Image: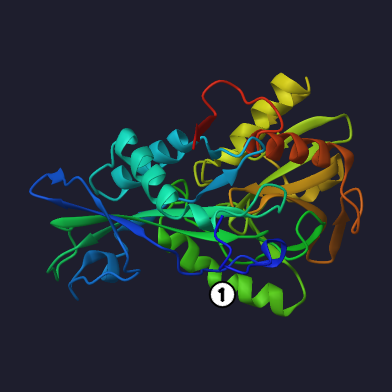
Amino acid sequence: MSTNLNTDWGNIGFSYRKTNANYVSLWKNGVWDEGKLVKENTLTISMGSPAIHYGQQCFEGLKAYRRKNGSIGLFRADQNAKRMQESCRRILMPEVPVEKFIEAVKMVVKANEEFIPPYGSGATLYIRPFVIGVGDNVGIKPATEYIFCIFVTPVGPYFKGGMSPIKLVVSEYDRAAPYGTGAVKVGGNYAASLLPHKHVTHEGYTDCVYLDPKTHTKIEEVGAANFFGITKDNIFVTPISPSILPSITKNSLLYITDKVFGMKVEERDVYVNNLDEFAEAGACGTAAVISPIGSLTNGKDKYIFYSETEVGPVTKKLYDHLIGIQFGEVEAPEGWMIEFK
């Protein structure tokens, strides 16, 4: 670990800071090149690039962890690679092979090893792979060339206060249309969330909850994270919908809850007028990991899950086990961790 960074790792927040190197690979004439590391954190592209005008781009988010034994760990990176392939297929971009994705991630992480926060700090190295359509273009059609790029940056907790209950409100806006791009990780979904997020944070909430766009009766997502609830009879429940992004963190929690703790799990509709069924609730995702939901306001109704100031016992147990796997304190299921020096 470099000593010239002079970083208070426990208080770095969730923001971008320039690191040593980034990865860039180009797709031309039907193939990806080998890719390389570059020092620049800028890209030069044509003004006609479809990524700029028509949103032909997608991205991923994962983390590198300094593990208890001193090694570097990647959590379920193959799942990020496969999800990026789904996103590319949905908007007609060439897929990045899983092996290429993983090797590129390892390459850029190793090049920035001094920026991986130390074990015990609670901070991690956030990894942002993305694919964009580039080249001279005016009409609405797929690009003729593409860039696959990865940058990294050290981050603390996504929500200020870390593992403490957050305050949410139901949004009147829709996150994604039925049969649209809600199930893939494309920028347009997030651009649509900027205004609703601004409104609710101005009102004092942490973020907003989006309902299904067709009936506005069922919970879909929490801002940029997935929703889950623990019922009063100890069932782990998470919404199911073709508009929800398949969360790797959520799928991992479903496995842990079932296989490790022996709890019943259900992926089903979660009606916003029936939230009294939950003793605890949370938001989960790569950035947030798990953020317990203290309260959720829907119009004149306010639901409190366990406590507005304390974390519920099941949520805390799941969080501890998940980050224990990531940081090497708990044995991981086979294939979940890629570990290297």
Q: Is residue 131 above or below residue 105?
A: below
Relative depth, front residue between 179 and 56: 56
Q: Secondary structure at mark 1?
A: helix
Where is residue 240? Give x, y as percent.
Answer: 60, 38
Q: Nearer the viewer, residue 32 or 58?
A: 32
**Left or right of 146: which side holds 212?**
right
| Colour pattern of the rendering | rainbow
Q: Mark yes or no: residue 92 visible.
A: yes
Q: Amino acid at mark 1?
A: Leu
Quadrant, the N terminus: bottom right
| Residue positioned most to the bottom | 202
Rendered location of residue 36, percent (x, y): 25, 52
- Side of 202 where 54 appears, left or right: left
| Position in image of residue 288 (x %, y %) | 65, 53
Q: Residue furthest front?
A: 3
- List the residue tagged with mark 1: 195
Image point 74% across, 34% down: which residue? 321
Q: Is residue 245 above or below residue 230?
A: below
